[in-house]
Image (cartoon, grey):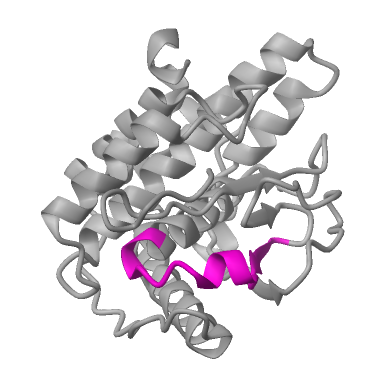
């Protein structure tokens, strides 16, 4: 998503996920020896994830601090603290499901490096690569012009949402579904994946709103901007139209829970 005038509509940072298709390495079956729940498989991993029954994310005090315009150091500190907060919040949710949980890796880059999943998309400020379970965050002049914490927290939480999808088996389902699929099918699945990450990110943002803080007027401005502009960096419509992005952001923020984020059973019109 391109940036906008922060005085009226806060800047929104563009994000994307990358996958190696098809994915392997998720082991199904009993995990009784460790007390872990077996990972859901295939379509059920997405449509009936146990995460949808874990209730609201915990209210968090991230103490992320402020981002100083133009300061890479303050931005790196902010991102790391938000990721630490996300680790704690999602560890709590996964504990409720008895699914295995692990932290993602975090990598900062001043250039758009190649990843094990492929090239860094030119329109993206950051990305998640499922192959090495790493969140890549760009530290560029354009990003550092935007010192508004809520915007960056939403962006980071979206990328983390892709890690959640990976751990929950949703990314595996997506990858096998689009393997050798026609273009229209790939785009439809991509939209459900990305819109769910929007929702999961917003659910987290709701639970840190008091600490960050996220003012109601600022949130409304963010959603309004996304509604009008969210699709403009994605001409193939692999992330959903602006109105779809705004809808799922609102669902996540209003619920504060993964329960509001099941894009996989939503009507086609809601994931357009």
The structure residue drawn at horizontal position 62% and vertical position 46%, both measured from the top left corner, is 16
Number of marks: 0
Residue closest to the eye, 242 or 267: 242
Q: Is residue 50 magenta?
A: no
Q: Position of residue 252 (x, y in %)?
A: 28, 42
Left-right relation of 213 to 4: left
Left-right relation of 104 to 87: right
Whether residue 45 is visible here, answered yes or no, is no
The structure residue drawn at horizontal position 65% and vertical position 46%, both measured from the top left corner, is 17
Left-right relation of 64 to 69: left
Of all residues, the one furthest to the bottom in this rendering is: 73
Residue closest to the eye, 226 or 99: 226
Question: What residue span does the magenta drawing correspond to?
Answer: 133-151
Q: Identify whether 159 is placed above or below 175.
A: below
The structure residue drawn at horizontal position 50% and vertical position 54%, both measured from the top left corner, is 13
Q: Identify whether 25 is placed above or below 78.
A: above
Q: Position of residue 40 (x, y in %)?
A: 55, 37
Q: Position of residue 202 (x, y in %)?
A: 33, 49
Whether residue 226 is visible here, answered yes or no, is yes
The structure residue drawn at horizontal position 76% and vertical position 13%, both measured from the top left corner, is 183
Q: Is residue 145 magenta?
A: yes
Residue closest to the eye, 248 or 149: 149
Q: Position of residue 231 (x, y in %)?
A: 51, 29
């Amino acid at each position: 998503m391109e940036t906008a005038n922060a005085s009226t509509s806060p800047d929104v940072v563009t994000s994307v996920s990358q996958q190696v298709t098809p994915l392997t390495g998720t082991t199904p079956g009993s995990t009784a020896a460790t007390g872990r729940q077996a990972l859901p498989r295939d379509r059920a991993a997405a449509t009936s994830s146990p995460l949808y029954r874990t209730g609201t994310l915990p209210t968090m005090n991230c103490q992320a601090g402020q981002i100083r315009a133009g300061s890479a150091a303050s931005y790196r500190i902010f991102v790391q603290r938000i990721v630490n907060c996300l680790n704690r919040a999602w560890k709590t949710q996964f504990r409720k499901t008895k699914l295995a949980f692990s932290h993602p890796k975090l990598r900062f880059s001043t250039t758009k490096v190649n990843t094990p999943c492929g090239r860094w998309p030119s329109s993206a400020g950051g990305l998640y690569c499922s192959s090495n379970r790493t969140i890549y965050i760009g530290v560029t002049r354009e990003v550092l012009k935007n010192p508004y914490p809520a915007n960056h927290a939403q962006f980071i939480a979206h990328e983390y949402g892709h890690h959640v999808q990976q751990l929950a088996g949703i990314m595996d389902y997506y990858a096998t579904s689009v393997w050798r699929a026609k273009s229209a099918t790939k785009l439809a699945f991509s939209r459900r994946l990305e819109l769910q990450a929007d929702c999961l990110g917003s659910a987290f943002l709701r639970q840190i709103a008091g600490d960050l803080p996220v003012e109601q007027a600022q949130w409304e401005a963010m959603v309004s901007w996304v509604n009008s502009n969210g699709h403009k960096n994605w001409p193939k419509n692999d992330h959903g139209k602006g109105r779809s992005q705004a809808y799922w952001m609102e669902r996540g923020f209003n619920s504060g829970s993964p329960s509001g984020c099941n894009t996989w059973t939503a009507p086609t019109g809601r994931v357009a």
